[in-house]
Amino acid sequence: VRLEEIELRVLQIPLVAPFTTSFGTETVREVIVVRARTDVGEGWGEIVTQSAPLYSSEYTQGAWDVATRWLVPALLDRRALAPEDVAPTLEPFVGHRMAKAGLELAVIDAALRSEGRSFASYLGGAAAMIPSGVSVGIQPDPAALVETVRGYLDEGYVRIKIKIKPGRDIAETDAVRSAFPDIPLQVDANSAYTLADADLLAQLDRFGLLLIEQPLQEDDIVDHAALAQQLKTPICLDESITSVKAARDALALGATTVINVKAGRVGGYLEALRIADLCASAGIPVWCGGMLETGIGRAANAALAAHPGFTLPGDVSASARFYARDIVTQPAVLEDGHVRVPTGPGLGVEIDSEALEAFTVARETLRA
Ligand code: OSB
Ligand code: MG
């Protein structure tokens, strides 16, 4: 495709309830939406940064700066651009993977829409529906957590993930496990511990968890390998897996036995696919993580999770888990514990322009 124009918008979308992790509480989702105008039509993408650099070093204003100053101009300089050319074009710019991923997605969407081909089929996904898990934030106390989890189970979610942090871990997990002895359950620490906490984390072993997600820091690969020796609960890295190379290294070192794939964190859906392929050939279970995506990124995640390498339920929940109003006309809903994989051209969702306008707090258009 030939890029004519890229429009970036910062959106602020209220959450239905505060979302608390070990790194902070969010009440509004601040995100960047990308619209690529090309000679063959429009495409949409989403840059999944959060407003502060707490989950990763990226954050919305930083992504905005690098995108407008460097990434978008580099793409607009190209005469023609296939989806596969986006990452190589942006490769000289170090890091900023979420920004790159959102731009790549907009080009992919434009190209596929013009070909009448769905994103899922482009990625090699066959599933019509994907099993849906939900990520539950830290609640005021264990009793409140149990009630929140009960609500999601009643809605039909097939797997529960609870956020933990030091001081809010063993009692919370115990409460949820005691209330629901048989549910698929996992925990996510978002880098809140150190190897010195190994004995504490080993207390989680008795709860029969599917996995513990990212207990230590992003660059603690060797420490995660050491921790894995001391836990029965499988370790699943999230923050640490920034590329297919990082995935290969973490697997080689025994730092992880399950991988959470997020396209934003690894620089795009095509890199995410390479990680899924690597894991499939190594027999490593993979699941699709989330970044509180709008309907754009949520549709893309559903397509990714339809790939046969994704063997565990992911964090691709219904839109209503986070938003009272989404920016697409047909937000993802839960059907018998599953989310439907869009089959229409490209991402297979249409933008609700009124909602998009209502949530827009900044915009800029760059032209070729
Ligand atoms: O660690 O998986 C994470 C949200 C923001 C940043 C990091 C994470 C999360 C979630 C929510 O757990 C996933 C979702 O439902 O989108
Ligand atoms: Mg995580």
Image: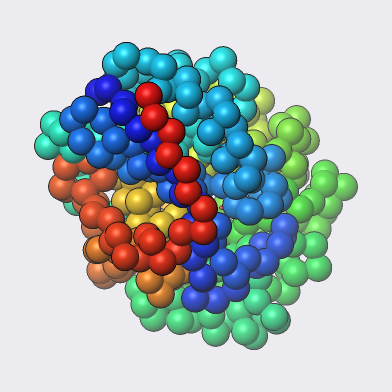
Quadrant of the snapshot with the N terminus:
top left
Q: Which residue is drawn at 13% across and 31% down?
A: 115
Q: Please indicate whether residue 123 sits to the left or right of residue 277 in the image.
A: left
Q: Residue at x 25, y 63 (%)?
A: 329
Residue 124 in view in this figure: no
Colour treatment of the image:
rainbow
Q: Toward which corner of the image does residue 311 lie, by quadrant? A: top left
Q: Nearer the viewer, residue 351 or 147?
A: 351
Q: Residue at x 27, y 22 (%)?
A: 2
Residue 193 in view in this figure: yes
Looking at the picture, does residue 38 appear above or below residue 163?
Answer: above
Looking at the picture, does residue 315 appear above or below residue 141?
Answer: above
Q: Please indicate whether residue 168 sits to the left or right of residue 305 in the image.
A: right
Q: Which of 27 and 309 is in front in this view?
A: 27
Where is residue 105 shown, x and y percent of the image? 37, 36
Where is residue 342 shown, x and y percent of the image? 21, 51
Where is residue 243 shown, x and y percent of the image? 54, 27
Q: Which of 71 and 287 is in front in this view?
A: 71
Looking at the picture, does residue 230 appear above or below residue 181?
Answer: above
Where is residue 140 shown, x and y percent of the image? 70, 80
Q: Toward which corner of the image does residue 275 lie, by quadrant? A: top left
Looking at the picture, does residue 323 appear above or below residue 32?
Answer: below
Quadrant of the snapshot with the C terminus:
top left
